[in-house]
Image (spheres, rainbow, N blue to C red):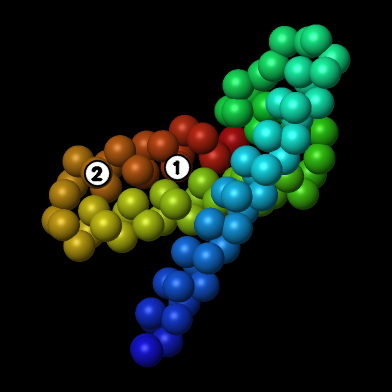
Amino acid sequence: MSPAQGELIRLLLLHCTVHILQHRAYDHYCKREDNDGEDQLEFEDWCYRRGEEIPQFQYWSIMLEMELLSHVIVRSLRQASFTIYFDALIELACCYMP
């Protein structure tokens, strides 16, 4: 296995781990909210709210999104697709630049 392949596998495992942990926490929130009788937030809204409350949650959410965008950019370069490349750059600029 080349170093590049090892790095890719490490990144994919990190993505999977963060994604699974986010959804486990959301499932726990849903079960707790069912007992309280309050309206449940959708997953995206819940993630946004948790990010405002917990800096570590916001950090890992942003890191996950930026890593996924970087993979989209790499894919666009490999496929020679300017449209995918442009869309990924626009999303990066709109979402993460102040």
Type of amino acid under label 2: Ile
Q: In percent of the image, x 50 and y 50: which residue is there?
A: 66
Res. 84 mark? 2
The mark closer to the camera, 2 or 1, is: 2
Residue shown at 60% from the left, 58% from the top: 17
Q: Is residue 39 above or below residue 19?
A: above
Residue that appears at 45% across and 39% down? 93
Task: Please state if 56 lies on the left or on the right of 90 as rendered.
Answer: right
Distance from the alpha carbon under mark 2 to that under mark 1: 12 Å
Please state if 21 lies on the left or on the right of 11 as rendered.
Answer: right
From this view, report whether residue 98 is shown above or below residue 81: above
- x, y percent for residue 53: 82, 33
Question: Which label is found at residue 92?
Answer: 1
Number of numbered discs present?
A: 2
Where is residue 25? Give x, y as percent. Answer: 72, 40
Query: Circle 2 sits in a helix, a strand or a loop, which is it?
Result: helix
Q: Amino acid at mark 1?
A: Leu
**Is residue 11 visible in the rendered structure shown here?**
yes
Task: Point out the tag, 2 or 1, that comes first from the N-terminus.
Answer: 2
